[in-house]
Image: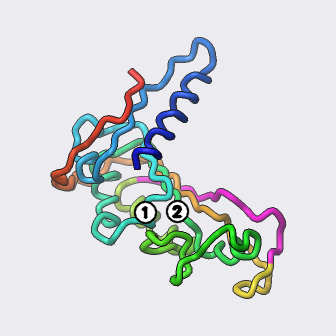
Amino acid sequence: SPKALEALKGSVQTLLCDMPAGAAPPHVTILSGSLADVCSSPECTGCDAVVMVETVEHLDPPPLEAIGPAVLGGLRPKTFVVTTPNSEYNPVMRQLMGTMVTFTDRGFRDRDHRFEWTRAEFQAWANSLGRHYGYTVEFSGIGNAPFDGVRSEADPTGQDLGSATQVAVFTATSAPPPPSLPAPGGGEMTLVWDSK
């Protein structure tokens, strides 16, 4: 959304202003467009990083399946970061946050979510992409329960349900397979902001 892009722009500008004295600031470009349009753009190939924050769960199967060939095979960033909700953590959120979080009738955190993965599902997806495109993948999480042993109807043992958000950090380690860029999406890629 335009509001989210403006917030991102403001955050990046703040980070750039907080650079240590004498440090060379990084070149940051924020683009908006379809996955196919951004990833088929030659100026984006070989970028340092691509970040998809709470995005994949909003994708239908065709664009979700395009992430590997478009981002890892086409753009070939040095680092690719993906975050997505951890469905195993939903009972903890229900217990700790009560009515502050409204779940859909499918048990998802947002009505626009097409799915919410368990940690095993997310790791299988990410590891498969990493193996195919020459990336190592490290997993972590954001937003742990404020105390251990949270018990719920879904997990009466209080075992580790992970974090609210799961994170995969892909790091390029080898030459990619031959590129399989998606055809341009026919939409427009918009330059939101450039730090130059």
Q: Is residue 194 left or right of residue 99?
A: left
Q: Which residue is mark 1?
A: 56
Q: Position of residue 35 (x, y in %)?
A: 29, 53
The boundaries of the magenta stretch are 135-150
Q: Which mark is residue 40?
A: none
Q: Is residue 90 left or right of residue 62?
A: right
User: What residue appears at the point 60 percent right and 62 percent down from the top-left corner?
Assistant: 165
**In the depicted structure, whether residue 114 falls above or below residue 80:** below
The answer to the question of whether label 2 and label 1 lie on touching residues, with beta carbons closer than 8 A, is yes
User: What residue appears at the point 15 percent right and 52 percent down from the top-left corner?
Assistant: 186
Residue nearest the observer in this picture, 104 or 135 = 104
Total numbered labels: 2
Q: Earlier in the sequence, mark 2 or mark 1?
A: 1
User: What residue appears at the point 45 percent right and 45 percent down from the top-left corner?
Assistant: 3
Q: Position of residue 53 (x, y in %)?
A: 49, 53
Q: Which mark is residue 84?
A: 2
Q: Position of residue 116 (x, y in %)?
A: 51, 73
Amino acid type at image mark 2: Thr
Amino acid type at image mark 1: Val
For mark 1, give the secondary structure.
helix
**In the depicted structure, whether residue 93 falls above or below residue 175:** below
Residue farthest to the top?
22
Q: Is residue 189 left or right of residue 194?
A: left
